[in-house]
Amino acid sequence: MEDKQVKVEQVSVDDANVTASQDTTPETESKQDKRVAELETALADMNDKYLRAMAELENTRRRAAIDSEARARTRVVSVLEKILPVMDAVDAALKHAPADEGIKSLAMALKSSFDTLGIARMETVGTPLDPTKHNAIQVVAASEDTASNTIVEELQPGYMLGDTVLRTAMVIVAK
């Protein structure tokens, strides 16, 4: 084995006390206190900026998620609005040929798909007119059986996706 020599410098405790006592004059202590206060202030400012930056980042993430969800919902609504005329055509075909098994099957498949997607057909006849859900095309005189401002006939069904109106229903209203 090799002999390694290590040089060790000897320092005494007395030497350290002399050095420390030289640096602690009242003037030096005052400068150190000021420097400590400055550093504490700078630390507090940096901490505040950090917390604000983190809060802004979280707000930006939240806004981005909300915007993304809104864009996706808008795209879904746009696509679903284009499918509604297909359902109208199937309903018209079913009224024209109610015994046709192919049309019945197609109508049931579309209804099942609508249910799965959360699309609901609005109930209109006999309900009060709601301008956000109904489009009154015609007004007729109210009879003894119907109250004023009540829907008496549906010309085109309306559909909803949750709380969103996909298409308003075209209706005839008693006045």
Image: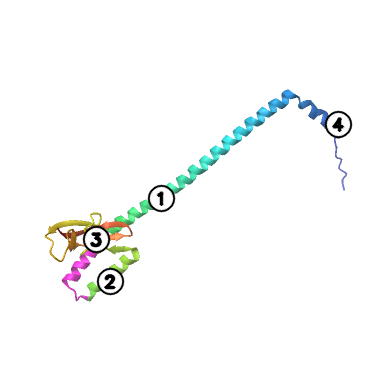
**Quarter-wise, where is residue 2 in the image?**
top right
Task: Give the alpha-carbon distance from disc 4 to disc 2, as whole Å.
Answer: 98 Å
Which residue has dot 2 on it? 108
- Comparing labels 2 and 1, the label whose residue is closer to the camera: 1
Which residue has dot 3 on it? 158
Task: Give the alpha-carbon distance from disc 3 to disc 1, as whole Å.
Answer: 27 Å
Residue 156 position, x and y percent, is 19, 61
N-terminal of the two: label 3 or label 1?
1
Three-letter code for the amino acid on which mark 4 is drawn: Asp
**Quarter-wise, where is residue 113 in the image?**
bottom left
Q: Residue at x 84, y 30 (%)?
A: 15
Q: Residue at x 68, y 29 (%)?
A: 33
**Quarter-wise, where is residue 122 in the image?**
bottom left
User: Between residues 150 and 171, which one lies in front from this camera angle?
Assistant: 150
Q: Residue at x 36, y 51 (%)?
A: 71
Q: Which mark is residue 66?
A: 1
| Up-down relation of residue 70 to residue 105 (above or below) | above
The crowd level at tag 4 (other Cα within 10 Å; few <14, some 14-19, many 20+) is few
Magenta stretch, residue numbers: 82-100
Task: Give the alpha-carbon distance from disc 1 to disc 4, as whole Å.
Answer: 68 Å
N-terminal of the two: label 2 or label 3?
2
| Up-down relation of residue 29 to residue 92 (above or below) | above
Three-letter code for the amino acid on which mark 2 is drawn: Met
